[in-house]
Image (cartoon, rainbow, N blue to C red):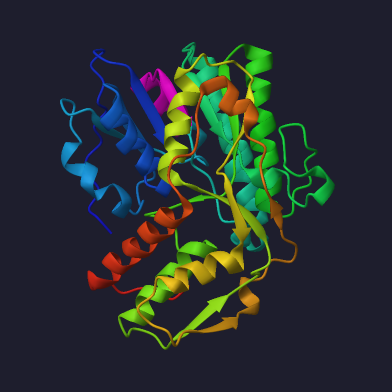
């Protein structure tokens, strides 16, 4: 874990500023990269004092008031810290990505998940409302709100009924509705997205495709036996690249933002988790990897048909996914190969 730098808020009233919650996650770190490369905005990351900074190590040398990157410390479950952050940063844009984001963990810790994701979102939006500031706000919900969808409802559009299949999904229903409430009740420019499966480099190893890639890299390096542990391989997913996702989020807040709007965003390539695994295995240098089902990786119920209709967002912004599935999987596996070669010690998940 990287050493935490001192608090620096990169704000001197010169440029527009984006505040990113979930700054150190896969999406938050890629979003920071995208904004720094494609805008003149300052970027301030909101993070907890004990956050793992591995995903943003490359940005830490830029943390100073002159180089567009700042940090502000806080926690979604420490509501006064949210108000302090809003007052300190005075953002023009807020990308609310922070969450307890692992569906499997939500079955173990449902109350923590609900509190962090619903009450944390409400506290952030309330802090913005009470501050009198009027930034453009992106609230990140999830395609998991749709949960178990019958084939007759595919592809899933914005008006498909919610049928959440985990405490995490229930928490994201709350997140979704809280975001729309603050737009409708208080006139905040809040927009909500239901992003379907998105992945790539820096993806957490608690998610299926990333733990598969990590296990393959560990097997190739001789760290573990050639046995790859899996959960449900039959779920259908539509895959997109995280770098396409953050480009979509940037367009969301800059292309004629509509207060209270809500959008499905996702890729154009669909396959089962098993097909995805077979593709990753085809990229491996080993041909002796055996697949073994691990009961601990199975959810009590699963959102097993996740195929989006993204025409509403595409018509509004002109966004289209650009990075093919094959490149996403290649880059994800290379990311884990690089991490394994770095000599780090890993839990096998």
Q: Nearer the viewer, residue 231 or 84?
A: 231
Which quadrant: the N terminus? bottom left
Q: Position of residue 58 (x, y in %)?
A: 22, 47
Question: Would residue 347 be seen by someone viewing this image from the given angle?
Answer: no
84 left or right, relative to 316: left
Number of marks in the image?
0
Q: Nearer the viewer, residue 49 or 320?
A: 320
Residue 115 is drawn in which quadrant?
top right
Q: Position of residue 19 (x, y in %)?
A: 39, 28
Residue 91 falls inside the magenta stretch: yes
Q: Which residues are magenta?
A: 81-95
- What residue is shown at x 34% (from left), y 80% (from top)? 220
- What residue is shown at x 49% (from left), y 11% (from top)? 132
Residue 328 is drawn in which quadrant?
bottom left
Asked if 58 appears above or below 66 in the picture, the reply is: below
Residue 311 is drawn in which quadrant?
top right
Asked if 60 appears above or below 255 in the picture, the reply is: below
- What residue is shown at x 43% (from left), y 27% (from top)? 250
Residue 240 falls inside the magenta stretch: no
Q: Position of residue 2 (x, y in %)?
A: 24, 55
Magenta stretch: helix, strand or loop mostly: helix
280 left or right, relative to 7: right
Q: Position of residue 94 (x, y in %)?
A: 45, 26
Question: Would residue 50 be seen by someone viewing this image from the given angle?
Answer: yes
Q: Nearer the viewer, residue 325 or 266?
A: 325
Q: Nearer the viewer, residue 256 or 114?
A: 256
Asked if 227 appears above or below 236 in the picture, the reply is: below
278 left or right, relative to 218: right
- What residue is shown at x 42% (from left), y 84% (from top)? 287
């Amino acid at each position: 874990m990287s050493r935490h730098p001192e608090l620096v808020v990169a704000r001197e009233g010169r440029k527009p500023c984006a505040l990113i919650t979930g700054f150190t996650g896969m999406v938050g770190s890629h979003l920071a990269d995208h904004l720094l490369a494609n805008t003149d905005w300052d970027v301030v990351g909101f993070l907890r004092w004990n956050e793992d900074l591995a995903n943003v190590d490359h940005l830490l040398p830029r943390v100073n008031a002159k180089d567009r990157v700042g940090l502000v410390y806080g926690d979604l479950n420490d509501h006064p810290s949210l108000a302090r952050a809003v007052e300190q940063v005075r953002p023009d844009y807020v990308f609310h990505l922070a969450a307890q984001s692992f569906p499997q963990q939500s079955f173990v810790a449902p109350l923590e998940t609900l509190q962090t994701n619903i009450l944390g979102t409400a506290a952030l939006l309330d802090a913005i409302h009470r501050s009198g500031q009027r930034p453009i706000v992106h609230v990140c919900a999830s395609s998991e709100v749709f949960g178990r969808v019958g084939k007759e409802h595919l592809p899933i559009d914005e008006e498909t009924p919610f049928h959440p299949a985990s405490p995490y999904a229930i928490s994201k229903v709350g997140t979704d509705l809280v975001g729309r409430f603050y737009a409708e009740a208080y006139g905040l420019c809040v927009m909500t997205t239901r992003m379907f499966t998105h992945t790539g480099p820096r993806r957490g190893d608690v998610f299926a495709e990333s733990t598969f890639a990590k296990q393959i890299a560990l097997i190739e390096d001789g760290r573990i036996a050639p046995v790859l542990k899996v959960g449900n391989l039959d779920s259908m997913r539509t895959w997109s690249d995280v770098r396409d996702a953050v480009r979509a989020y940037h367009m969301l807040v800059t292309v004629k933002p509509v207060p209270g709007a809500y959008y499905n965003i996702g890729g154009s390539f669909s396959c089962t988790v098993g097909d995805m695994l077979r593709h990753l295995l085809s990229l491996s240098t080993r041909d002796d990897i055996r697949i073994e089902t691990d009961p601990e990786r199975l959810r009590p119920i699963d959102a097993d048909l996740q195929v989006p209709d993204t025409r509403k967002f595409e018509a509004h912004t002109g966004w289209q996914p650009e990075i093919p599935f094959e490149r996403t999987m290649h880059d994800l596996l290379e990311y884990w190969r690089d991490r394994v070669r770095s000599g780090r010690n890993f839990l096998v998940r």
